[in-house]
Amino acid sequence: MVFSSFIFLFGFLPVVLALYYITPRRFRNVTLFVVDLVFYSWGEPKLVLLMLVSVLLNYFSAILIGIYRPKKRLARAIFILSIILNLGLLGFFKYIGFIGETLQFMLPFLNIPILEVSLPIGISFYTFQTMSYTIDVYRNTVAVQKNVITFGTYVSLFPQLIAGPIVRYSDVAEQLVNRRESLQQFTDGVRIFLIGLAKKVLIANQMGVLWDILRKSTDGGVIGAWCGILAYTFQIYYDFSGYSDMAIGLGKMFGFEFMKNFDYPYISESITEFWRRWHISLGTWFREYVYIPLGGNRKGLGRQIINMSVVWFLTGLWHGASWNFILWGVYFGILLIIEKTFLLKALKKAPAIVRHIYALFFIVLGWVLFYFENMGEMGVFLGRLFGAQGFGLSVNTGAAILSFLPLMIAAAVISTPLLTNTFHRIKSSGVRMVLENTGCVLSLLLCTASLAGSSYNPFLYFKF
Amino acid sequence: MKLKQALKYLPAVLFVGFISVMFLLWLILPKQHYSAQEKRVLADFPTLNAETLFNGNFQKELDTYLSDHTPARSFFIGLNADYQLITGRNGQSGIYLGKDEYLFPKPVKESENLLRNAQFIKEFADSSDIPVYMTVIPSSGYVNHNKLPLIHEEYTDDQLIRSFSKALGDKVQYVDSAAPFFEIGDKGQLYYRTDHHWTSKGAYKCYSLLGNALGYTPLKEESFTKETVTDFYGTSYAKAALWAIAPDVIELWHNKKQPEDSVTVEIRDGADVKTSHSYFFPDQLRNDDKYPVFLDGNHSLVTVTNENAEDRTLVVVKDSYAHTIVPFLSQHYRNIIMVDLRYYKKDVSALAKEHQAEGVLLLYSLDNLSEDTNLSYLF
């Protein structure tokens, strides 16, 4: 079930909110767990079992680790086995087809069969979440959760189940047992949810329409190609950050606080800064559970570069079972290493505008690598960006760009903190309140209208 | 102070209120089976059993069901159309809003199918000993070029029609209506504002243009009395969803000198035959789509007999645009046999021979012609 659908907004959510709040406080996790399973099985009626397997696997590993903690080697063995099983499940369901294809390509004489396994929704997200728990238990930084319902609720919590943010168990352990929902928190949640919904429905989906037009047009020239990849740049940001906002907002409605996942990434002045502002929960996860355990930056520059390479290879791979995602990860890894070794220092001396252009250029170019799974198509599109199909713009492509221009400009403005800052500078709380409520009503009405008006509603991040 | 405290929570109240009301209305409101506005059957409540639940079909179909039966669906669809328009995306629905509340379907694009159809018609004409005539009716947006919105895709009807008519070869007598129509432009209302079809005036202009080739002297406009029918909302209106636009007026042109009972219209759909004594079918005006008032809309085979006209027979192979022009042509032919290749799958040459027709007229609009894949049934 996606958040921006009628079935979620006008079916699931009102019913679930009612059920949740009439449930006595101590049974609320049970209610949540049940509706989480309904939510997940809505899209994956069979693979919900896989998620339950993952829940039980980590639940029992943690308990065993807790029991055998005094026997260090045994605890360690259980821990390693658990990690292998977790990664094994993820590897099988997400990467087996990809591995088969790659082997077949490299060793065609072996006749390696390619297994067709359908990717369970959200497996990349929930596997990382459950692993954060088992790892932290092993490190003894969180207590073992003995209540399987509580742990199941954490893993399957529907607001962030299918597209993040990746909530670490340690961040919500306390909230899972002792949370006090409040009307203020609920109201904040509504506000963030509606912002996210508007981002997804009113901007991302529309930018997707423009990107489709411009990607397929053969007479758009350089301008058409750049406008196209800019449209995709906005689509992916508004789609993903909109989804994260909706998740955070929904979390608050049920008394949870999740970490911020996006912080105006496109205002970054370097790639290093971009990755501190983009998909923060994923970056945090990799830093916490891969980069730092590998030694981080404490073992000299050489080792640091190796560590960064590993992290960025994995970051790319996490995004999808295809070489272009690995390419995309490695591309950022290289940029980050270059920045770390000398470029950041040099950039400091350049004017801000140069830093912005530098960062945006490489971010936007990165989305080309990210979008095209087919290397041939990627090459053709890169060629178009740099003039392989001429500069001229046909009337029809021009008309498409012009008709989306107002939305593009809005998307550009809203991707900076300008509007939020202006809003907070308004002194009169009355004016702020009127603006805020008008915004909420507009978002609700226009999103409903937009969903009614079109069935174009794929969530980009379902692939991962 | 207390009120101000409570007002802080207004967004939550609005949100929960809205989604709950939508949910409850959806439960309570009676469900329609057919949407007149969208001209389609709405989804039924999906079957719920273990199989549909486990393969996910129930879930998918329930979502469709819910969106098909959303409370105030047409309000929201209209709101979306208005929102798209004011944020610059005129035409995203496939329909442009032009000046003076004109709605235009987006331009017809170049297609291989168009030239394939030309090839079928050429082969048909080459193999036929009866003269073949043709005209292609350009689109409303091309003709009303002065009424198009500021930002719009290019209407290249003239180029498309030129390359099409060239491909027809010498045996087809092609009569150009694109250039004369373009010249008239928005001066006479040749097309409806809210529909893709041409008006009686548009059909009359084309009828005047065809006279030379077909061999008749067109009647003057003054020979007709014009009966008007109001409140016509066409297909473009339904697609654009800009509900505030004013309706069109349909004109039914009656020849002043033609007695009522001299006309016989015989409609055949397979074995079904019905006859009537007028070009116009007022019963159709009660429906949402009123255009079928002309010759009762689309049928496989329709014979129009006019006792007062010269003893000539013409076969018209056509789409729905022809329904407006055939009453004019009927003034000069005792028999007109209209064939719709979407439903009529028999040999047209044989039909023409059987009725000793003196000609076959192919009459298509550019948009239909570029998409129609039934021209192969010509012979």
Image (cartoon, coloured by chain):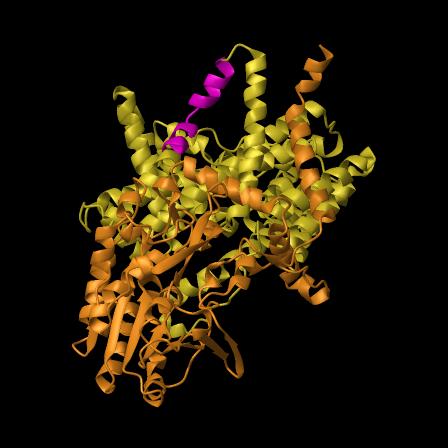
Quarter of the rendering containing residue B327: bottom left
The reply to whether residue B287 is visible in this rendering is no
The answer to whether residue A198 is seen in the rendering is: yes
Percent coordinates x, y for residue A141 in the rendering: 65, 33
- Relative placement, left or right, of B373 versus B21 is left
Does the magenta-highlighted stretch encompass residue B290? no
Q: Which residues are magenta?
A: A409-425
Chain shaded orange: B
Q: Residue at x 30, y 45 (%)?
A: B152
Q: Which chain is yellow?
A: A
Residue B285 higher or lower than B338, as above or below: above
Nearer to us in this view, A424 or A237 = A424
Q: Is residue A342 above or below residue B68?
A: above
Q: Is residue A411 magenta?
A: yes
Residue A351: percent from left, percent from top:
26, 20
Q: Nearer the viewer, residue A127 or B375?
A: B375
Write the residue at 51% across / 66% down: A116
Q: Is B161 positioned to the left or the right of A285 in the image?
A: left
Q: Is residue A238 left or right of residue A215?
A: right
Q: Give the main secondary structure, helix, strand or loop, of the magenta stretch.
A: helix
Q: Check the image and report above or below for A347 versus A112.
A: above
Of the pair A190 and B345, the residue shown nearer to us: B345
